[in-house]
């Protein structure tokens, strides 16, 4: 069954998409980062706890904020520009929600708050680049349906952001 594509765009079949994903996700870098990192294994091996549940809820809310902003701005901008605006709006929302509701960050000083915010923005810049490149390559160049790519990219970005937040930004000292 072919992937749903925009009617005006050239068809790309399911096999092409999955071959591209297979090449991306079977590199040694992926295996080294996700399969051989003991801290990530430790996090994934633990039972669901309040933090993970709260992160999932905040992640879903952040994704909704991102999607709503994306589809609002898509009416007046290109998909890539819309995605950049949606990303910026969702980063501010995500910082506030994650620092207060998920990780109970120590915000004893303005300097500490500023440091965490900068780290958060840098991490989100990395995931924002991943998301923008995905939209650019899969939607604008390979002509896949933007909703499908937005869903797949969002799943990856939520997982990536949790690991980075847990191990770097909001780590307990």
Image (tube, rainbow, N blue to C red):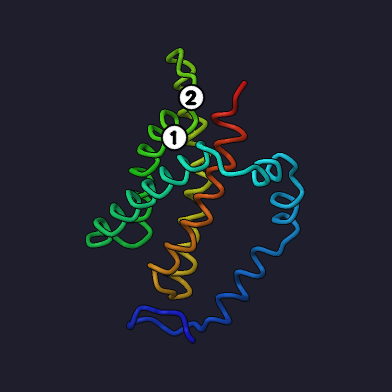
* Secondary element type, mark 2: loop
How many neighbours does mark 1 have within 10 angstroms: few (below 14), some (14-19), or many (20 or more)? many
Q: Earlier in the sequence, mark 2 or mark 1?
A: 1
Q: Does the CB distance between marks 2 and 1 fall below 8 Å?
A: yes
Residue at 46% x, 46% y is 56
- Please give left or right for residue 65 compared with residue 32 in the image: left
In the image, residue 103 lies at what x, y percent? 50, 30
| Image quarter of residue 80 | bottom left
**Res. 105 mark:** 2
Nearest to the observer: residue 131 or residue 141? 131
Residue tagged 1: 98
Image quarter (top left, top right, bottom left or bottom right) of the C terminus: top right
- The spot of residue 5 in percent (x, y) is 39, 79
Residue 51's place in the image compared with 13, above or below, is: above
Residue at (35%, 51%) from the top-left corner? Answer: 66
Left or right relative to 15: residue 53: left
- Looking at the picture, tell me which residue is in the foreground, 50 or 66: 50
């Amino acid at each position: 069954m072919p992937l749903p594509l925009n009617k005006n765009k050239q068809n790309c079949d399911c096999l092409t998409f999955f071959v591209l994903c297979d090449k991306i996700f079977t590199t040694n870098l992926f295996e080294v980062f996700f399969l051989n990192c003991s801290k990530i294994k430790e996090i994934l091996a633990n039972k669901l706890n309040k933090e993970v549940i709260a992160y999932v809820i905040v992640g879903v809310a952040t994704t909704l904020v991102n999607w709503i902003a994306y589809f609002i701005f898509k009416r007046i901008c290109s998909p890539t520009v819309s995605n950049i605006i949606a990303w910026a709006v969702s980063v501010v929302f995500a910082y506030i929600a994650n620092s207060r509701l998920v990780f109970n960050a120590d915000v004893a000083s303005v300097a500490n708050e500023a440091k965490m915010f900068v780290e958060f923005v840098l991490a989100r810049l990395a995931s924002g680049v991943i998301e923008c490149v995905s939209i650019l390559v899969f939607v604008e160049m390979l002509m896949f349906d933007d909703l499908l790519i937005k869903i797949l990219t969002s799943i990856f970005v939520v997982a990536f952001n949790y690991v980075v937040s847990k191990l770097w930004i909001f780590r307990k000292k």
